[in-house]
Image: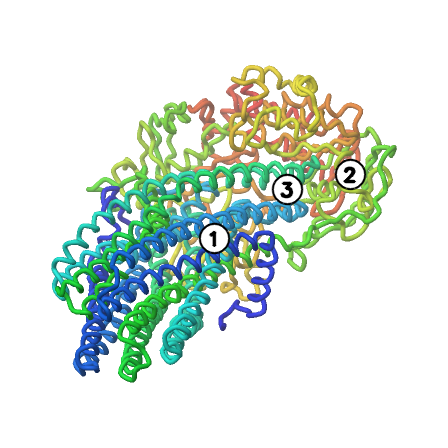
Amino acid sequence: MTGDDVDPTSRRDISRRLLAFGRPLWWALGLSITFRVLQMSLGIALFGIGAWGVGHVVAGGDVAVGGVLGWMVAVALAKALLRYLEQFSGHYVAFRLLAMLRNDFYARVEPQAPAGLSGRHTGDLLARVMKDIDRVEVFYAHTIAPATAATLVPLLALGYLAVWQSAVVAAVLAPFLVLVGAVVPLWSNRAASAAATDLRMARGELSQHLTDGIQGIREVLAFGHEEQRVAELGELSARADRANATTSRLMALRRGLNELFLGAGLVVVFLVGAAQVQSGGLTWGDLTVVMAVSLLAFGPVLGVEEFIADLEQAFAGARRLFEITDAPPAVTDPADPTPIDGREPSVRFRDVSFTYPGARGERAGPAVDGVDLEVAPGQRVAIVGHSGSGKSTLVSLLLRVHDVDGGAVEVGGLDVRELHRCDLRESIAVVDQRAYLFNDTIAANLRVARPEATPDQLEEAARFAELHDTIAAMPDGYDTVVGEMGERLSGGQRQRLAIARALLRDAPILVLDEATSNLDVHTEARLQATFDRLAEGRTTVVVAHRLSTVRDADLIAVMDRGRLVEQGTHDELLATAGHYARLWAAHATDLDAALAAVKG
Amino acid sequence: MPATPAAPSRESFLAPIRREVASSVIGTWLFALATSVLLVLVGAGMDDLLDSGGIARGVVIGLIVTVVVRAAVAGVVPLIAFGAAGRLEAWARERVYRHLLALGAPLRSREATGRLVSAATEAVELMAVYQATFVGPIIASMTVPVLVIVVIAVAIDVWSALWLFLAIPVIPVMVRAFQSRFQAVSDQYRDTASGLSARFLDALQGLPTLVLFNRGVAHGEVIAAATERLRTAIMRLLLGNQIVLFVVDAMFSLGMITAAAALAMVRLRSGAITPGEAVALVLLGLQLIEPLDKVGQFFYVGMSGQAAAKEVRAVLDEVPTIVDPADATAPDDAEPSVVFRDVRLAYGDDPEVLRGLTFDIPAGSRVALIGPSGAGKTTVANLLQRQMAPTAGRIEIGGHDLASVPAAWARSMITVVAQTTYLFTGTLRANLQVAAPDADDATLLDALTTANLDAFVAALPDGLDTPIGERGLSVSGGEAQRIAIARAVLRDAPIVVLDEPTSNVDVESEAAILSALDRLTTGRTVLVIAHRLTTVADADQIVVLADGVVAEQGPPADLADAGGLYAAALARAAGTEVSA
């Protein structure tokens, strides 16, 4: 196979890997193939019997037409039954495999979260788990079975002709079957691969151009750039159309050649068979059966070209799946984790440096560079800075979403890399920008934090978060389904639910990662008291964009372009008139917030 | 550009390729006819063999000619059909894109972008292949048995043909039976798939949360259990439903193949047909069952093609909010002034966002629009650019009501530097030429200098030819904003709208952007949508927007003393500073 991304070994590897994965279903696949081969063979036999009947009428005239028809009815019913069984077992394989592939996908993606997922759009992942898995399924249910049948059924037909009719006829027919079933499809597939690559590339560019044109539609309209974009689209379309014309011509040639070989095979078999009749090797009646069997034997092999195309799709789908499932997790648990029990809840960043994997070698540089910060047990430390200054990166390093490149992050005096991730996560409760709500009941969403929580405990947590009354007013109370993406809850209610989760979690360390930055000033102010109560008695790390929420912190750490540039209390930092003071000044001139505040 | 009227979207997607579809139908029939002739000739040869011990030269020549013609027809049909598919695809894609442009920019969410791109790419491809290669040939092959029966009547035996004709009603019955069963299964499958899809989406989006709470693995088991329930449900449905396969397969085997064989034997025995004709009749049974082979495709392929066509149609059926009046002509010249008169706006049945907004921007003046976030400031900018139309009231540029002039004219009067800037895939030059297609390098470099980007472009590896945007160099937010300013300079429109252009950049970039903006706005009419006290001080007028109306308005100095919202906000900001 030639082509840009086509590597024969990888193709073989993919097949081997997919076959191994499907091993638990080989028995069902085997059954489906058996039913298919039998069903198709009976289809040929049906015509053979009819032809045989005609031959016997001509030869003797005393054959019972009723008897022949009786056989045909029996074969017809058996064939129909086998077809039903073939389809059912095929579907069984297909649906079982879909479930297996999807569960496997989830199981392999789960350890990569959250680091492995942050760079990818969920839409892309979803497309892979749904569409690409659908395509991969085709490999099992719609290529292995037809391919095996396309090989076995003609072989059975040839075997019958060779043994019961004439070896010469079988020998003459065989090459034509090979031409139609193997030579033409493989040749045309190879010939089409360059054009197929062109077409794929042209379509990729079309898609990119359209995405650009739609995402940038504001600019396109504002600058009156419409006709220009349409013209560019037209050019790209024309390129795709040229590639398409090439594949169409090849497809036309393939169909034409297939039918030519089929027709030629039939005529040659007929002429050779006729010579055999003349020489006495075959009877006239035999030749009728030979013609019927030969004609029908082409049926299964004509389908080969279709599943070769499907197979290409399946390989492409498999490659896209493996791309995700084979990615190594960003972090792994140590072989011999140190237990965290009994350690005091302190947090320490020790000369920490980190560059995001995707940004290595880019001009952006490290996200965090030589940060040294200590949070004593029970202390409340705020990390502030512009967006992109590295605040949230510090949080992900604390949660071990990524591992540091240099230095160490410690919890309770232990390097987080020595801990089991489950233990680490048990010790830290996080409230981030926008709590994720599953499309499930309120109770289930709360129990994410603590699966064994009793209804009383849920209510207690909700009351603490001042969410109980809201929930009680809902149609089904705690059993109310929140709807896709939690649409039924307002931003403030959503964050209250996150507070309730954090309380249920009851971890000694609390991380508030921009927990109120999506809320308006009023809601933020109302939530602040609840956050304060939640933080009582806990070691708390607050990452904040708006400074009004952090001025009472025990310590404020100021980040700028990955470096910790200042630390101290609000008053101390203002007095130094440095970064923090500038941030505070900008905060003070924020008109939106001031207007919202004075409007009341 | 002319807006696509809504009506033509109703026209059939087949219209542009009607001739090709008709040709492919005829081609399919010709192919079937050639096959029939081939089999009838085999019968004739069999007769020769029986009568004279050899096959007549004429029959052999006939066979060879038929084989060649048949192969040629087989090749021509896909050539026509797939060629037509390519043309239809390009035609439909342009149509969809033009329609999207007419629909405008009611600010697309990421999900919506994905859906629209998919409609213009995948759906258009599937739809085109379906219309061009499926509708004609597949439907034609459903009618092949009728053609074959005619051949039998003409070439073999009228009575056999009549008897076989009795089996023809099996075809529509089969199609109906298949349709109802298939519908049930495919509905359930679709529900299953979309349910599963939603579940996976939920799980993938929530995975970071699940993992933080150590619930990732447990949730995998929940999903697996749900998947398994759906699987068993669909298998149970198939168990009963697929019996239709058994029935249909048996009906064809009995009604067509067995019937043809029976007629061949009976009519042969009674001497009505020759032995060769009997052989041909048996073999022609193969063509009588052609619909059986195609009915599966008819539904499986047909279903996805129809779904794709529906998806494309859905986009084309969306009615644009802004349609130029038929007689709209661009005014020759207009002074760069803006008037909002009692402008109201509501989205659907939601409460009004703007509730009678009135203010003026005299030509050459600088007006700052301020208000709490969510007050509708950006909406004002969108209305002015004619991205949307007010529900009531009027907006004028240079005294011309925007409702009566082409939207493109209004847009040509204004240039906007917004909160974020979209960079197209392509070079820096192409991204600048969006604003001025014919600008030469000197002009482009001048604009970059005005936008404080001269050092930036000098440092680029390939200067203006450096690729930026999604596949190119990553550009910081501040640089992107200055590219937007360069575009605005090139556009050279008399009215400039600044929609919080520095809200997403850091302090250092802000200074560079602000000085570039100063150069851009000199000598133009300016509307500043502002959220910083520092950016409103030099405005001629401040308009304070609150609760959908103008709460107060006046020169900054006057408003500061007026005791209103602006004064209170000033006092509060000062208080924050003092409290430090």
Dots 1, 3 in contact, CB < 8 A? no
Disc 3 designates what residue?
A387
Task: Identify whether A287 is placed above or below A326.
Answer: below
Task: Identify whether B566 is placed above or below B335.
Answer: above
**Coordinates of residue A119 in the picture (x, y in percent):** 60, 49
Earlier sequence position, callout 2 versus callout 3? 3
Which of discs 2 and 3 lies nearer the camera? The answer is 2
Which of discs 1 and 3 lies nearer the camera? The answer is 3
Q: Between residue B454 and residue B24, name the one nearer to us.
A: B24
Q: CA distance from mark 2 to mark 1?
A: 50 Å
Q: Chain of mark 3?
A: A
Q: Secondary structure at mark 1?
A: helix
Disc 1 designates what residue?
B486
Q: Secondary structure at mark 3?
A: loop
Circle 3 residues within 10 Å: few <14, some 14–19, many ≥20: some
Q: CA distance from mark 1 to mark 3?
A: 25 Å
Would residue A245 be visible to someone looking at this image?
no
